[in-house]
Each structure stands twice: as C-alpha cells, then as structure tokens.
Amino acid sequence: MRLRFWPVFLRNFLVWKKLLIPSLIANIAEPLMWLVAFGYGLGALVGEVTMGGDKIPYIVFLASGSICMSAMNAATFEALYSAFSRMHVQKTWDGIMNAPVRLDDVLLAEMLWAAFKALFTVTAILLVMLALGIVQTWKLLMAWPILLGVGVVFSCLALIFNALAKGYDFFTYYFTLFLTPMMFLSGIFFPLDTLPTAVRWVADVLPLTHAVALIRPLFLDQWPSNVLLHAGVLLTYGLVGWMIALHLTRKRFKQ
Amino acid sequence: MNESQLRCTHLTKRFGDNLVVDDLSFELQPGECLGVIGPNGAGKTTTFRMCLGLTAPDSGSVNVFGLSMPQDALAIKERLGVVSQFDTLDPDFSCAENLMVYGRYFGMRSADIQSRIPTLLEFAALSHKANAKPGELSGGMKRRLSLARSLINNPSLLLLDEPTTGLDPQARHLMWERLQQLLQQGKSILLTTHFMDEAERLCDRLLVVDHGRKIAEGKPRDLIAEHLEPDVVEVYGGDTQALSQGDLRAHAQRIEVSGDTVFFYTQTAQPLLQALLAYPGVRSLHRPANLEDLFLKLTGRQIREEG
C-alpha cells in the first residue's frame, strides 16, 4: 500500500523550500515582535503574574501562551490562504487528482503540511527563546509534539472554512469571529481567572485554552495537570474538525 | 487487444433541473482518436469529468480498460493521461520539476522519472526551457508542457479537453503534429474541441453532441457526405431577401440566411455561379462543404453564451 498523500506533502515542501527565507521571516518575525514588545515592555509594568500560588515573570507567562498562538496562526494561514490558492486559484488539486491520487489524500496532505509549518515555526521561535534565555528546561522537548498536535487541530478547523470559501474575503470571518476572540480568551496575554464567570465558560471550551494549559507548565519546568481532559478536548476538536472538513471538501468537489 | 479503451453507456447527468448529459453512449477503440464536438454548454466537459470519475453520473456507466469508473478510479488513472481545459501547472516549479513532481503522484521512482524527463521535454519542444517556470512560457509552450506531463506515466489512453483553445496557428500546428505522433505510437485519444479543422485533421471518428445528446457520429468525411451537399456558395453584400427567394433557388438544394450572408448548398456550383453574374455588386465565395457547415447545420447558428 503506498501512501498517496506523501508526494502531495512533498510537493508543498519543495515549493516552500524555494521561498524559505521570506517564509521564515514572515512566520517568526511577527511572533517575536509580540514577545519583545509585550514581554519586555508590558512585562516591566506587570512584573509578575500569579499562577495558582506561584509568581512567574510576565515574559515567561507570555512566551508560553504565545507559542501556542504561533502554532495556531501558522497552521491557520497555511490551511486557509495557501491551501485555497492551491485548491481554487491555481487548480493544483485538480491537476493532482488527474493522477492516481484521491481528494482525501490531497486533503490529508494539506492538513499535515499546515501542521508541519506550525511545527517549523514554533521550533524556530523556541530556539530564539532559548537563545534569549527566556526559558531553559529540557521539558520543552515535550512541548514539541504537543505543539505539532495544536497545529493539526487548527489546520483541521481551518480546512472547514477552506472548503466553504468562495474567495479570500471569506476568511476574514474566521479570523474576526473565531481566531481573534480566541487569542484574547485563552489565557495568552493575561490569566483567565481575572475574567467574569460567563466569559470563563466560553474560554473553557476553546481549543487554544487547552493548548495553553498543556504547554505553560512545561515552560515553568512543571508537568501539566488534567492532561487527559486537555488532550481529549484538543483531540475532539481535531477529529470532529477533520470529519467536517473532509465532508465539506468532498461536497465542494462533487458539484 | 480488441477490448475497447473507453466505453460510456447511457450516461445521464442532471444539475438541478438542467439535463446536462442525456443518455450518451460511445466507445473508443485502441489506437483511435475520437473527437467530441459541440457548442458551449453541450455537456462536453461534464462528460469528460464523468470519464475521469470526478463527477458521478446519475445513471449509466463509464468503463475504461475494462475497469469501471469511479470504483476503480485509481487503477484506471495509473494508465491514463489527462490534459484539462485549463493548465494546472505548478507556477513555482521549472518545467523539469513540474514533470518530476507529477511523476511522483504515480508512485514512480525519482530515477525513473528523471530518465524520462529529457525525452518528454524534447517531445514538447521545451528542451531549452527545462529550467524555466511556467510563467515564463508562452501559451503554446504551457499546453505542450501539460501534454508532456500527462505522458509521464506512459499512458495508453489520453483524455484531452480542448487542448488547443487559445493558441495561435503556429502553436496549434505544433500541438497537432505531436498528437499525430502519439497516435502513430498506438495511443488512443479522446479529445474535445471547438475547432472543426482540428477535429477533421486529427480524429478518426467524431461525436457531435448538443444539449447533452448525441446528434451524429461517424468519420468526418462520411458525416459531411451524409448530411451536406458537396459545394457551398456564400454570397455577401446583396439584398438577402431577394437573393434567397429569387431565381437562384433553382440552383441550390438548401439555402440558409445568417445576418447579411446567404449560404447556398448545392450539388453543382457552376450554374449557380453563372446565375450570380446577373447580380452585380454582390461578392461570393465558392468552397467545398466542410465540418463547420455540418456543425452549424446540426447545432444551429444561434450563439450559445452559457458555460
């Protein structure tokens, strides 16, 4: 049995390799600006954040949250704009499907590719964080596969909107109505316990909240608690997202 | 190998209330070039997509190499070459890389693909453009690269959807020459086209479709002989009413008026041309009947704007 998604994944990788430098800058420069501006700037005002009795430096608090946000953004951009270009604008998918490759294989390749880009982005940012001395713990090695999982979850979710899109403008809804609120409600910039109860309920069902809950303790050289709960929520988002994306993409191509 | 390469049986497809393909059956024999011609919206592209398993027919079946679509789609596509109406080349890859990447979709080993690339680029007259990206190529070069790409797996059957639409005459002639070469190698070709000269030149047999239905099928010359008078005289610049209703009628078997032109279809043109001398100021063109006349007779002269 040959893995039919693999040549499609490889295709995306080879294109990306050609544009490596600009891609690298775009993926890494922005998250680092957030980190430096807010971490050092706002961090000087805030000082420390209290987390379950512990006081931790704001920059570590922010770094551990924003790395999850970077995974989310990298996967989302790839699975929305880039996948849509390949699917709808360049008709790359149509060309591929004239060869013995199924639509399901193409979609799987796109999903894994967007997750890979997320992994690549967070790896580069983690290296910079290590170099800056923001974080120093071998538990970061554990953060790595989790962040890949976060990339998978958000590429699955983004592919739902990719399947529904008529044009690039459609993605604005996804960003404005889903991603931006989630950025503020998942405990990246400030602890969730300062929020009103009703808002916390919303926060508790958002996938990014659970990603942060798994990653932040690792940054503090601790083990996360309620691992099964957080991993379960992420897994559910990923699986359900994938099923919906697959269904809608098949429907789109059936016409 | 007498088994047909492609057989469509009673294909029917509806989009909503719109019957796009209506009980269409045809067969493609090994080594044959079958052309599907029809106006815009006749159902050519939908038929093409059903042959590729991309659109499921409401009823009827598609059989390729004795395997059925879409159940055996992967096995069929291993042995199929496809050039779709719009190029789907990878803009970020060079010509050679486009072939390499495409070959991998067939599960071919890189070394095997690599060894085919020079031959295919030469076939496409693109050896000098191996490292150029599609954006740097002319329309004709892109189409030839698409054709070369479809040959990467050495298919025995090629499906070509309007392979020369939008090309200039030089590029079209080069494309035709290449397609003739492929036919000489024994490949079978199913081709849709708008160009009657292309259909006449390349196709052993033609299928004329309109409103999703097959309205004629046969060898190009036979179809013309069967449906048309051998000679056509086109007359311009006169009073179409007087020309078409007057004494000239006696010399023609059939008369058509389209805009300011009167078409006289006749068995022998000489008497008609003599009689035309009595109409000073009109211009005329005498020519043999061709496939375009047949097409227009069968599908009408009105413009089809849709899809």
Image (cartoon, rainbow, N blue to C red):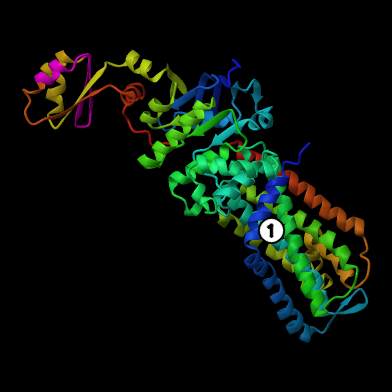
> Residue B150: image x %, image y %?
57, 37
Q: Is residue B85 visible?
A: yes
Query: What residue is rendered at 54% in x and 25% in y?
Result: B186
Query: What residue is rendered at 19% in x and 14% in y?
Result: B268
Residue type indicated by callout 1: Thr
Specify the quadrant that holds the C terminus of chain A: top right
> Residue A17: image x %, image y %?
66, 59
In which quadrant of the rendered view does residue B156 lie? top right
> Residue B4: image x %, image y %?
58, 18
Residue on which disc 1 sits: A76
The magenta-colored residue range is B253-275
Vertical order, A110 against B279 (above or below): below
Specify the quadrant that holds the N terminus of chain A: top right
Q: B295 left or right of A3?
A: left
| Residue B155 inside the magenta-drawn segment | no
Vertical order, B6 against B77 (above or below): above
User: Observer-nearest residue: B219 or B180?
Assistant: B180
Total marks placed = 1
Query: What residue is rendered at 66% in x and 57% in y?
Result: A78
**Crowding near the residue tagged with mark 1, few <14, some 14–19, many ≥20 C-alpha atoms within 10 Å:** many
Q: B223 left or right of A197?
A: left
In which quadrant of the rendered view does residue A35 lie? bottom right
Q: Chain of mark 1?
A: A
